Image (spheres, helix red, strand yellow):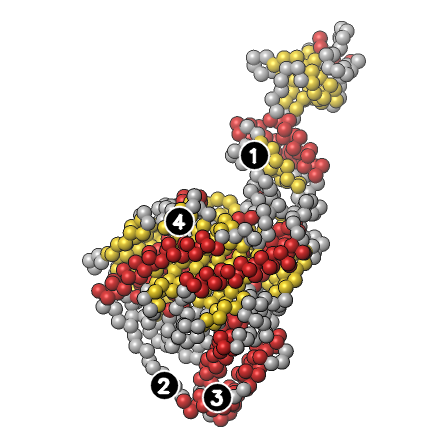
């Protein structure tokens, strides 16, 4: 092992160290990042050979959780090792990807893979931003062409005070969880990735948090620049592929006004199809003229550049969009609820050609998702899942499991909705929403927030306020001097634009933000302007579309939804309800058909599709845990006959003795003359002796049996 080369910076209360390690000596770049006792290893590797005719940059980012990092042996009892990445691991990988991807040069056509492995975890310092820091430095000290570094910090807010890189404990108390990354652009920080969740926080607090983070981002970037300078890292050179000027002129002549005509004339719903048809015609024209010379691929790339320029030019100079909207205008909006007969709640939200259908299911507390991971072991009672089938954009693809994009969009909407979900004390149900994207032309994640809010209200879930979301786009000129913000971006504007800024929230404030860019970053001014535009549009959706569809949550649950009865008992009596080997609780469930969940705190949740059976089970449990007191009267069942008296079950599992002398107001020779097994009789508790035995009287009850 080489000598350590460690650099340290203090951010907030924590010192973060970067060690240029040779542990992974065959990687192009490797860094160990440490904060407290959390340690991550980040590697960056680039393939040795280029790939030809790629329509995308082949970057893969992975985040690897290791159970040993937390000192745990987890996983299936038959395997006891890590399996597929957890949802949280996928979200972390996407966070790193979104910050580093915009800074790779467009000419790079080699595969690049960045892997973050958490080697040690102290339950205080989150490895997610450490992984992004490490990715930035690993790429910067490697020979991989990358135009970083980036800085990244997390900002929280507790009791009105902004704090830097809060611990897990502090984040649990915070109104805000704001992760932002940025790179230097002409000496100023340009923000290129944001991930935030908040408790309905106003826009101005986010602007304050952005300014609060700025100097710390600068410090992180400057530290990395210094490390890179000392390392002497050299990047592979740009191959400087010569432009085929003559071919570009031919392509330009072929296109002339065709592209502009296709984009801004005719039926707006089919304009991109028309543009793609022109692309196919251009490729065919060039291939026919230069057969076997592989110039059609060059022509396609030229077409994409021209298309990008055309969309930018129209937005910047003419304030024109491919569907004729003004920059601040949304597409046609509408919504519906109660669409399907057997679901507990449903909502359909339509924004132009984008349509999302959200279906809600209410379940018992036992239906909660069990989480077992490196960072968290516990239960999850609110879930949002997002499905993007191939038919949504009109494509044909194989159906597989949820993609990383599905998981990311589903989690974003879940974060946006969570602040308005009632607590378990207010609403003890497990809640699962599934959003089906049935038609897509951009902004499906924010549409899913809207349709999910509708489904929640349709189901009668008492949310505090509905949530809506909107995506803001950006067209920036080549010099970065002039820009146009676009409200409610659709597919082409997302693909050819420079920013996808998703903002979700209520009329009170923001609940979630996600920013992706294709440029180096955005300024604080653009951030502020985008938040303002998003707020205006969000309130319009909430007040003029969603509120008119369903103004508030329904007062009654769907008759198809289960009913939950809640009872708080002494935790010491949980064993009585369960019984030896589960005998008592199994008897109750067999007799009534209910589901019973018992927490260690003594909370008992009884879930039943039949309200009468649920009430019966509740009464039985109450009877089991109720303390019998002298003077109380009960109606009980005779269970046994003895020579000296009869045993009567006054409460489930609790019997008392009616002595023969207390059966009637006269002398009784035989117990069987008065009562028989199975009789239902009124009795009064005479006393409970020092051994806990219950003595009853039939003759002293209000309606003694003669």
- Residue 394: percent from left, percent from top: 60, 71
Give the number of marks: 4
Report the Cα–Cα distance between label 3 and label 1.
Answer: 73 Å
Disc 2 target residue:
242
Instruction: State the image quarter where residue 614 is shown.
Output: top right
Is disc 4 placed on a helix, strand or loop? Answer: strand
Secondary element at image label 1? strand
Q: Which residue is mark 4?
A: 162
How crowded pointer 3 is (Cα within 10 Å; few <14, some 14-19, many 20+) is rated as some
Q: Residues within 10 Å of mark 2 (few under 14, many from 20)?
A: few
Mark nearer the N terminus (3 vs 1): 3
Of mark 3 and mark 4, the one earlier in the sequence is 4
Q: Quadrant of the C terminus?
A: top right
Q: CA distance from mark 3 to mark 2?
A: 18 Å
Q: Residue at x 56, y 48 (%)?
A: 420
User: Picture coordinates of residue 274 (x, y %)?
Assistant: 58, 81
Can the viewer see residue 246 in this picture? yes
Task: Find numbered disc 2 in the image and state the secondary structure of the residue it sits on.
Answer: loop
| Residue highlighted by disc 1 | 603
């Amino acid at each position: 092992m080489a000598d350590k080369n460690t650099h340290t910076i203090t951010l907030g209360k924590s010192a973060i160290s970067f060690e240029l390690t040779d542990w992974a000596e065959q990687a192009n770049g490797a860094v160990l990042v440490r904060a407290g006792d959390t340690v991550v290893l980040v590697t960056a590797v680039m393939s040795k050979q280029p790939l030809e005719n790629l329509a995308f940059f082949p970057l893969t980012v992975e985040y690897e959780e290791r159970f040993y990092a937390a000192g745990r042996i987890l996983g299936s009892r038959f395997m006891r090792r890590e399996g597929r990445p957890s949802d949280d691991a996928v979200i972390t990988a996407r966070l790193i990807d979104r910050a580093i991807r915009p800074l790779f040069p467009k000419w790079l056509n080699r595969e690049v893979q960045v892997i973050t492995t958490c080697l040690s975890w102290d339950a205080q310092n989150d490895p997610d931003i450490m992984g992004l820091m490490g990715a930035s430095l690993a790429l910067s000290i490697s020979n991989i062409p990358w135009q970083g570094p980036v800085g990244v910090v997390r900002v929280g807010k507790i009791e009105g005070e902004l704090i830097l890189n809060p611990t897990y404990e502090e984040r649990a108390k915070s109104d805000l969880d704001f992760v932002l990354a940025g790179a230097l652009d002409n000496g100023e920080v340009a923000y290129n990735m944001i991930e935030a969740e908040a408790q309905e926080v106003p826009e101005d607090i986010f602007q304050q948090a952005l300014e609060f983070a700025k100097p710390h981002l600068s410090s992180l970037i400057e530290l990395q620049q210094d490390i890179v300078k000392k390392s002497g890292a050299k990047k592979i050179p740009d191959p400087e592929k010569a432009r085929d000027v003559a071919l570009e002129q031919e392509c330009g002549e072929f296109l002339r006004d065709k592209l502009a005509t296709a984009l801004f004339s005719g039926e707006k719903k089919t304009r991109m199809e028309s543009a793609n048809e022109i692309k196919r015609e251009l490729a065919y024209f060039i291939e026919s003229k230069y057969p076997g010379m592989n110039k059609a691929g060059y022509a396609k790339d030229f077409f994409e550049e021209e298309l990008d320029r055309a969309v930018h030019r129209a937005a910047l100079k003419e304030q024109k969009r491919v569907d004729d909207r003004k920059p601040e205008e949304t597409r046609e909006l509408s919504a519906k609820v109660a669409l399907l007969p057997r679901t507990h709640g449903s909502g359909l939200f339509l924004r132009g050609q984008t349509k999302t259908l959200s279906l809600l299911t209410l379940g018992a507390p036992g239906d909660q998702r069990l989480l077992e991971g490196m960072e968290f072991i516990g239960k999850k009672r609110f879930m949002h899942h997002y499905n993007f089938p191939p038919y949504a954009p009109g494509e044909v693809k194989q159906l597989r499991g949820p993609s990383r994009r599905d998981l990311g969009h589903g989690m974003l909407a879940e974060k946006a909705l969570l602040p308005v979900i009632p607590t378990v004390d207010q609403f003890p149900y497990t809640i699962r929403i599934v959003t089906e994207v049935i038609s897509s032309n951009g902004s499906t994640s924010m549409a899913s927030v809207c349709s999910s809010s509708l489904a929640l209200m349709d189901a009668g879930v008492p949310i505090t306020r509905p949530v809506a979301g909107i995506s803001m786009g950006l067209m920036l000129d080549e010099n970065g001097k002039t820009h146009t913000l676009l409200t409610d971006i659709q597919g082409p504007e997302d693909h050819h634009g420079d920013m996808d800024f998703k903002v979700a929230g209520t009329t009170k404030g923001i609940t979630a933000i996600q920013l992706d860019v294709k440029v180096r970053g955005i300024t604080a001014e653009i951030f502020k302007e985008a938040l303002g535009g998003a707020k205006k549009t969000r309130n319009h959706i909430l007040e003029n579309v969603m509120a008119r569809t369903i103004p508030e949550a329904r007062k009654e649950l769907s008759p198809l939804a289960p009913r939950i009865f809640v009872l708080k008992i002494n935790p010491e009596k949980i064993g009585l309800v369960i019984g030896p080997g589960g005998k008592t609780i199994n008897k109750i469930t067999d007799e009534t058909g209910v589901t019973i969940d018992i927490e260690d705190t003594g909370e008992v949740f009884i879930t039943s599709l039949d309200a009468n059976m649920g009430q019966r089970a509740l009464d039985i449990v109450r009877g089991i845990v109720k303390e019998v007191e002298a003077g109380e009267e009960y109606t009980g069942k005779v269970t046994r006959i003895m020579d000296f008296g009869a045993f009567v079950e006054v409460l489930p599992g609790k019997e008392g003795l009616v002595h023969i002398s207390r059966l009637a107001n006269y002398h009784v020779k035989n117990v069987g003359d008065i009562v028989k097994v199975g009789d239902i009789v009124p009795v009064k508790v005479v006393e409970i002796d020092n051994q806990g035995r219950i003595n009853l009287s039939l003759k002293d009850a209000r309606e003694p049996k003669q």
